[in-house]
Amino acid sequence: MSAASVRDDARADRSDTRAISPVIGVVLLLAVTICLVAVVTAGIATWSIDTPAPTAAFELQADGDDSTITLEHIAGDSVTVDQLSLTVRIDDTELEKQPPIPFVGAEGFRGTPDGPFNAQADSTWQTGERTTITLAGNNTPSLNSGDTVTVTLGFDGQLLTEVETTAT
């Protein structure tokens, strides 16, 4: 073999190894880019924009003789009743049976509620409207005069308000 052919073979070997490096670099760059796109897409998919709860004020009254609890919407935004949850506590003990909102004839409650908690009423609770629920005798604890009544209203999983009063 001549010296020229040995040199040509050595150049051919070097150029083959040099050509592999850019290909590997491009493949690695593509893999990193695909991974980044997947992470960003997953992050955006789990990102949710919650609707803020309305801003509203309520007044609570409780009557131990009639076993009634009355809530009045006294100021602020209108509230969509279908997105409300209600928790009633008497002397820091939750009622055994909580009222579903809206309802008609729910277990643990007498009759149907007045106002926007009635399933037949308009589903928007506006300023000036009040609702009354009456506890049934089979719902514990019972409501008596002098008891502290606390009502927590949630809106679409967020705390809307918590109001408290002493039953008359």
Image: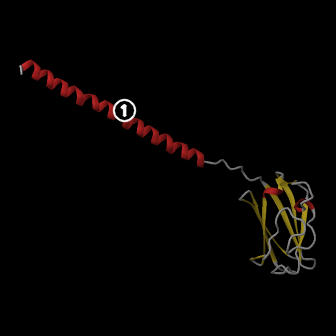
Rendering quarter of residue 155:
bottom right
Q: Pointer 1: residues within 10 angstroms few (<14), some, or many (20+)?
A: few
Residue 97 in the image: state x and y as whole percent. Answer: 80, 74
| Residue corresponding to mark 1 | 26
Judged from this view, the residue extending furthest toward the front is 1
Give whichever of 17, 2 is nearer the camera: 2
Give whichever of 89, 27 is nearer the camera: 27
Say what secondary structure mark 1 lies in.
Answer: helix
Give whichever of 143, 3 is nearer the camera: 3
In this rendering, the answer to whether 49 lies above or below 151 is above
Residue 101 in the image: state x and y as whole percent. Answer: 83, 63
The structure residue drawn at horizontal position 91% and vertical position 73%, both measured from the top left corner, is 110
Question: In which quadrant is the C terminus drawn?
Answer: bottom right
Q: With 10 as the anchor, is 102 left or right in this view?
A: right
Labels in figure, total: 1
Q: With 37 as the anchor, is 24 left or right in this view?
A: left
In this rendering, the answer to whether 50 lies above or below 32 is below
Q: With 153 as the anchor, is 20 left or right in this view?
A: left
Rendering quarter of residue 147:
bottom right
Residue 68 in the image: state x and y as whole percent. Answer: 90, 73
The structure residue drawn at horizontal position 85% and vertical position 75%, both measured from the top left corner, is 108
Residue 71 in the image: state x and y as whole percent. Answer: 86, 65
Q: With 130 as the anchor, is 90 left or right in this view?
A: left
Question: In which quadrant is the N terminus drawn?
Answer: top left
The structure residue drawn at horizontal position 79% and vertical position 59%, both measured from the top left corner, is 84
Question: What amino acid does circle 1 point to?
Answer: Val
